[in-house]
């Protein structure tokens, strides 16, 4: 969805062909290290946008090489773009893989949860180390979007490390508590009740 | 031979019921040229460890060896000598002399050591240039930003060519941008200029610049992590993981 809307935005700047859009997308996200999109995805997305009337094929350019289809945004496309730009982005906090590992280490007793935390911390510090060095070597004059994304990653790592400290400090309390178990549920169909008035 | 080695280093403040154990049986080896960060919650003994290694405080028991010399066996004069010649200190509050310019501040340890002021100043300017302050050598501390003042303090710590730099929360008084710059310079002090750096910090981002992070809790080392940078420390990391398994 985001790539689709970004393409709308880039076509909102001016009409472009697929190859140009791919390059413009890469530039605006700060390189493919930040967000890698394959050219094929650009072309299929363009087709879908065209089907929905959000972009329109404006011209065919052929200067010696293979022909290039030039796309432009439509008024409908512009409306959709404005809606997308104004809407906030919800962050995702679910499905933490490390948390799953930690809970399973607690549940199974196979590995000391302290060790799981230690391994995670070492890995986070290694990532933080790598990103810090990368950030230092990026030129702020020409690669601002790369810097902003590196800063984002660095700050998330810092938060993860703080979270680990917090878990570690509470590990003894967590150990004392019973681990979450599923609620016991009787097998088979639920028994009918007298008030059941579903009519079936 | 490691440049710093502690053996069962213990520090207890106070006596009897009110005694507080700040450090307990800490064994730490730091190799020459290493950049080590010490982390842990406040009150975990980080600064105590740094002060004992720097000879600013005496242990209750255990030993500190710097370049093989047991600090406990030295008299005050020799200890002061070692502190002055072999160690450089960087603190959270830069502790610069307000009426002196950057170069004069940085040259002070050499001047106190009897080096001619002109020679001392030249050495200081050299370090100020390396640390990115070539056009600030005559500015007084109040004419410098926090980050610049800390650079002057670092130049002061480096002018008499110590092998060991001890930094106690060197970025604690700086905004995050200046903090990053100082951390980057501390890394260069070790990686490019070959000094050993031992830094205490509570900031993960700053610690991530080091080759190794030592985690202290309640006065003991609870964890250690080697950070791999261009292959450096790789072998140690592998060894460390093997031990874990």
Image (tube, coloured by chain):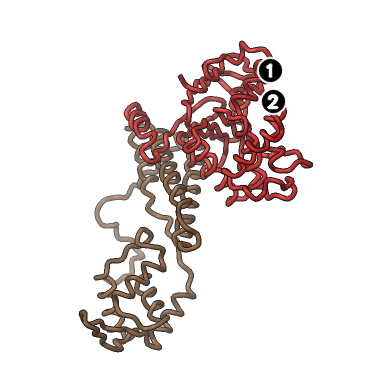
Could you tell me residue B54's position as x and y percent? 61, 24
**Of the residues tagged 2 and 1, which is closer to the observer?**
2
- The answer, for residue A123, to whether it is visible in the render is yes
Which SS class for mark 1?
helix
Total numbered labels placed on residues in the image: 2
Q: Quadrant of the C terminus of chain A?
A: bottom left
Give the drawing colour for chain B: red
Q: Is residue B195 above or below residue A165?
A: above
Asked if disc 2 and disc 1 are in contact, CB closer than 8 Å, the reply is: no
Q: Residue at x 39, y 67 (%)?
A: A27
Q: CA distance from mark 2 to mark 1?
A: 44 Å
Could you tell me residue B182's position as x and y percent? 57, 44
Could you tell me residue A64's position as x and y percent? 21, 82
In the image, B197 versus A79, the foreground residue is: B197
Give the drawing colour for chain A: brown
Q: Residue at x 63, y 26 (%)?
A: B51
Q: Is residue A117 above or below residue A93?
A: above
Q: Which residue is mark 2?
A: B113
Mark number for residue B93? none
Mark number for residue B17? 1
Residue A9 lies left or right of residue B8; in this view the side is left
In the image, A171 versus A64, the foreground residue is: A64
């Amino acid at each position: 969805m985001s790539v689709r809307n970004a393409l709308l935005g880039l076509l909102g700047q001016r009409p472009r062909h697929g190859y140009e859009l791919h390059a413009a997308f890469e530039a605006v996200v700060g390189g493919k290290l930040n967000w890698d999109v394959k050219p094929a995805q650009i072309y299929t997305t363009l087709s879908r946008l065209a089907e929905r009337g959000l972009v329109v094929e404006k011209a065919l350019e052929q200067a010696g090489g293979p022909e290039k289809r030039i796309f432009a945004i439509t008024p409908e496309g512009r409306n959709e773009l404005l809606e997308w730009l104004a809407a906030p982005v919800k962050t995702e906090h679910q499905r933490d893989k490390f948390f799953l590992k930690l809970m399973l280490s607690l549940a199974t007793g196979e590995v000391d949860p302290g060790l799981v935390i230690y391994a995670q911390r070492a890995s986070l510090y290694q990532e933080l180390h790598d990103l810090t060095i990368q950030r230092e070597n990026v030129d702020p004059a020409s690669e601002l979007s790369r810097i902003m994304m590196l800063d984002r990653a660095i700050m998330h790592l810092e938060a993860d490390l703080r979270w680990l400290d917090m878990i570690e400090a509470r590990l003894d309390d967590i150990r004392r508590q019973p681990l979450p178990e599923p609620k016991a549920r009787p097998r088979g169909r639920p028994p009918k009740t007298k008030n059941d008035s579903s009519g079936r | 031979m490691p440049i710093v080695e502690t053996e069962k280093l213990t520090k207890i403040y106070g006596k009897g019921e009110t005694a507080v154990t700040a450090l307990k049986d800490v064994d730490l080896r730091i190799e020459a040229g290493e950049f080590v960060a010490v982390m842990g919650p406040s009150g975990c003994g980080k600064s105590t460890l740094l002060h004992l290694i720097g000879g600013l405080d005496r242990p209750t028991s255990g030993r500190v060896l710097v370049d093989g010399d047991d600090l406990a066996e030295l008299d005050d004069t020799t200890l002061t000598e070692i502190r002055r010649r072999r160690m450089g200190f960087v603190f959270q509050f830069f502790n610069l002399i307000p009426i002196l310019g950057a170069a004069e501040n940085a040259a002070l340890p050499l001047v106190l050591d009897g080096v001619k002021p002109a020679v001392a100043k030249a050495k200081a300017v050299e370090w100020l240039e390396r640390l990115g302050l070539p056009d600030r050598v005559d500015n007084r501390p109040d004419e410098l930003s926090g980050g610049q003042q800390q650079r002057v303090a670092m130049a002061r710590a480096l002018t008499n060519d110590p092998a060991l730099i001890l930094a106690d929360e060197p970025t604690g008084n700086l905004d995050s941008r200046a903090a990053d710059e100082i951390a980057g310079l501390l890394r260069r002090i070790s990686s490019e200029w070959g000094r050993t750096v031992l830094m205490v910090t509570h900031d993960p981002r700053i610690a991530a610049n080091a080759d190794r992070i030592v985690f202290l809790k309640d006065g003991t080392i609870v964890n250690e992590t080697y950070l791999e940078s261009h292959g450096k420390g790789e072998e140690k990391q592998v060894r460390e993981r093997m031990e874990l398994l």
